[in-house]
């Protein structure tokens, strides 16, 4: 006897059984069946945003904070299109998110080739999403949903994780599923065909296998043995950790580092691997705005960089790629073979690439850690470099926003996650936010999407069930300011910090240096202006306060102690800057404002 259920009931039941209880989206005709199924499921909850982009970013924040899969939905046409920035964010930052879009009934399609639009609010969402998803499919027959949903889930959550999109015509949504299956498994070959054949069904998977073959090896045991051999020879090893080594892998790596006194440097996305003041934490690598000490240690002092799940893109190591860490051997472990085709050392001299899961390699290293030496003297040198260069930065007057962030981080120490938007405040935050061990800082990394932080913080709250915070600039906060109604409606305990310099500060800095101080569309009076955030928050019924930058330590702490959602607007001068900054053409360990020569020479001699 067959077991039948409504198709959208099956979709919600499937995702709920996989651990997704919170769904983010916006209601509409072509997605109404799915939303109704969420409402009927006692273990599922739908949370409505006020723009589908907010729902997509909330799902990203949820996935980041929980280290698990999230879900967002939208109706057809403009609703689905509004998801795309969040889809791209999940794709570039390797976040497993299931995106579900509604679509017009299959019987409304005319079959006329070249017809611009088949029906009202129709859009070819699959074609639009393919470049920024691991897998995108339209299900046109209810019989196919079991396979497609199981396949999409496995694709999103294995290998280099990322988003998938399932487009559901309305008549398919109200169809039936016979004999639902919740744990169908697919072979490696089937996954490769689906993921890499999305644009080239004939050769996509073959191109992928060819890319894997270009690595030195795809065997975890070989990678671990090679790393152990090189560590025996090294005097100054560094663990470089990226988002591709998250979760349990990140913990195993930091445990190894602690046991053997190995310095740790991270990407911005992985900066939560260690607490800010952890003696092993030597900051974020950054071609432009990374920590001075991270850049100096990695680029000029180490003799072995052990890179786990970190892309080493130009944003991290600078545009003069072949100049990076010329005195060090580089070993790269990455599941993505295309990332490994970035050649760091010219001709790959002193560089080895292993296309394999970082987790598999680190597990083998952990089992053989008796072969790893101890590096106390090297760690002490790194600690001296950090201390000296922090003093240099602390003496830079233009970095007063960093000091505000450091103070505010102490006031936000009881939050579970802090989402940071895009702009100068992002630089100030990843440089100076004193995250506690286990407290996550969330960023829109590769996509760099303004408007990310507020909805991402909302998603992080539903992932953790604990108070969260977001840090934004005035430009970024206005991108999704409508989600204040979501905060008020569900009484979300989020502390919102808006650093208001009444300008698009990062572009203004660029215009000062390269456009003769012509501040087009970045400053008040030249095509840009900010709203009154204090009044806007009050209008939404959210407690708010506006203070001047110099009064942060006087008033911010008491205000942020209150329960429930709050918005703190901090007024800055509009001529703010992000320092230290690497000047074009300079080595990344020699940033502006320049290190005093006696200190620089002393540290380079260590």
Image (cartoon, grey):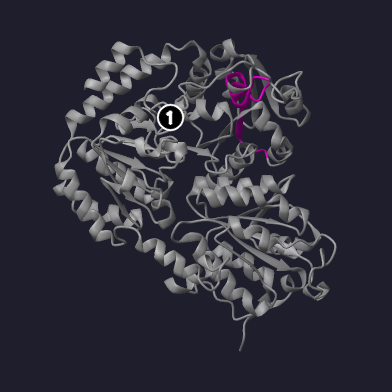
Q: Nearer the viewer, residue 362 or 543?
A: 362
Q: Is residue 312 magenta?
A: no
Res 458 visible:
yes
Res 252 visible:
no
The residue to which callout 1 is attached is 290
Residue 235, x across and y down, in percent: 17, 36
Rendering quarter of residue 100:
bottom right
Residue 48, x across and y down, in percent: 71, 49
Over which residues does the magenta segment extend? 491-513
Query: What residue occupies the far right of the structure in this picture?
Result: 120
Q: Quadrant of the C terminus?
A: top left
| Secondary element at image label 1 | loop
Q: Nearer the viewer, residue 468 or 345?
A: 345
From the viewer's perspective, tell me whether residue 157 is left or right of residue 366: right
Q: Is residue 511 magenta?
A: yes
Q: Nearer the viewer, residue 524 or 13?
A: 524
Total residue callouts: 1
Badge 1: few (under 14), some or many (20 or more) residues near its Cα, within 10 Å? many
Residue 93, x across and y down, in percent: 51, 48
From the viewer's perspective, tell me whether residue 508 is left or right of residue 161: right
Q: Is residue 72 above or below residue 536?
A: below
Q: What residue is shown at x 38% (from left), y 25% (from top)? A: 292
Q: Quadrant of the N terminus?
A: bottom right
Rendering quarter of residue 548:
top right
């Amino acid at each position: 006897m067959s077991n039948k259920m409504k198709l959208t009931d099956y979709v919600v039941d499937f995702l709920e059984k996989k651990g997704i209880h919170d769904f983010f989206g916006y209601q509409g005709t072509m997605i109404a069946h799915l939303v109704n199924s969420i409402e009927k499921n006692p273990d599922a909850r739908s949370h409505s945003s006020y723009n589908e982009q907010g729902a997509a970013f909330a799902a990203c924040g949820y996935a980041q904070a929980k280290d698990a899969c999230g879900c967002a939905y939208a109706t057809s046409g403009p609703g689905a299109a509004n998801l795309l920035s969040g889809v791209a964010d999940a794709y570039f930052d390797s976040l497993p998110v299931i995106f579900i879009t509604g679509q017009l009934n299959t019987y409304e399609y005319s079959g006329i080739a070249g017809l611009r639009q088949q029906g009202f609010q129709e859009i070819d969402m699959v074609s639009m999403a393919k470049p920024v998803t691991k897998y995108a499919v339209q299900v046109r027959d209810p019989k196919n949903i079991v396979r497609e949903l199981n396949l999409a889930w496995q694709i999103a959550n294995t290998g280099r994780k990322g988003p998938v999109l399932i487009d559901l015509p309305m008549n398919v949504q109200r169809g039936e599923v016979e004999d639902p299956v919740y744990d169908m498994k697919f072979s490696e070959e089937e996954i490769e065909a689906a993921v890499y054949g999305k644009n080239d069904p004939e050769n996509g998977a073959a191109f992928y296998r060819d890319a894997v073959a270009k690595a030195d090896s795809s065997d975890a045991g070989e990678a671990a043995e090679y790393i152990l051999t090189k560590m025996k020879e090294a005097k100054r090893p560094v663990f470089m950790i990226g988002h591709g080594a998250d979760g349990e892998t990140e913990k195993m790596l930091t445990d190894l580092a602690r046991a053997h006194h190995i310095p740790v440097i991270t990407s911005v996305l992985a900066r939560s691997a260690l607490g800010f003041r952890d003696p092993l934490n030597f900051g974020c690598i950054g071609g432009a705005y990374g920590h001075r000490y991270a850049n100096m240690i990695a680029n000029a002092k180490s003799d072995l960089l052990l890179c786990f799940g970190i892309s080493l893109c130009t944003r991290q190591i600078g545009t003069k790629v072949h100049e990076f860490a010329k005195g060090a051997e580089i070993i790269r472990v990455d599941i993505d073979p295309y990332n490994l085709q970035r050649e760091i050392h010219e001709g790959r001299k002193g560089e080895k690439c292993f296309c394999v899961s970082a987790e598999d390699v680190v597990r083998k290293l952990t089992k053989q850690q008796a072969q790893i030496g101890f590096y106390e003297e090297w760690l002490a040198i790194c600690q001296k470099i950090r201390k000296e260069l922090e003093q240099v930065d602390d003496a830079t007057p233009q970095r007063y926003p960093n000091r505000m962030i450091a103070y505010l981080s102490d006031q936000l120490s009881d939050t579970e996650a802090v989402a940071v938007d895009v702009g100068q405040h992002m630089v100030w935050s990843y440089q100076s936010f004193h995250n506690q061990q286990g407290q996550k800082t969330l960023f829109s990394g590769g996509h760099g999407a303004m408007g990310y932080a507020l909805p991402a913080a909302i998603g992080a709250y539903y992932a953790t069930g604990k108070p969260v915070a977001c840090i934004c600039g005035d430009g970024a906060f206005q991108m999704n300011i409508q989600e204040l109604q979501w905060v008020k409606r569900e009484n979300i305990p989020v502390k919102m910090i808006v650093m208001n310099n009444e300008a698009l500060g990062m572009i203004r800095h660029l215009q000062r240096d390269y456009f003769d101080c012509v501040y087009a569309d970045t400053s008040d009076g030249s095509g840009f202006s900010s709203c009154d955030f204090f009044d806007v928050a009050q209008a939404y019924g959210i407690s708010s306060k506006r203070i001047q930058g110099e009064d942060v330590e006087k008033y911010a702490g008491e205000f942020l102690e209150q329960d429930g959602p709050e918005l703190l607007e901090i007024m800055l001068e509009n001529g703010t800057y992000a320092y230290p900054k690497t000047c074009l053409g300079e080595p990344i360990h020699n940033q502006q404002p320049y290190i005093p020569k006696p200190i620089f020479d002393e540290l380079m001699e260590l």
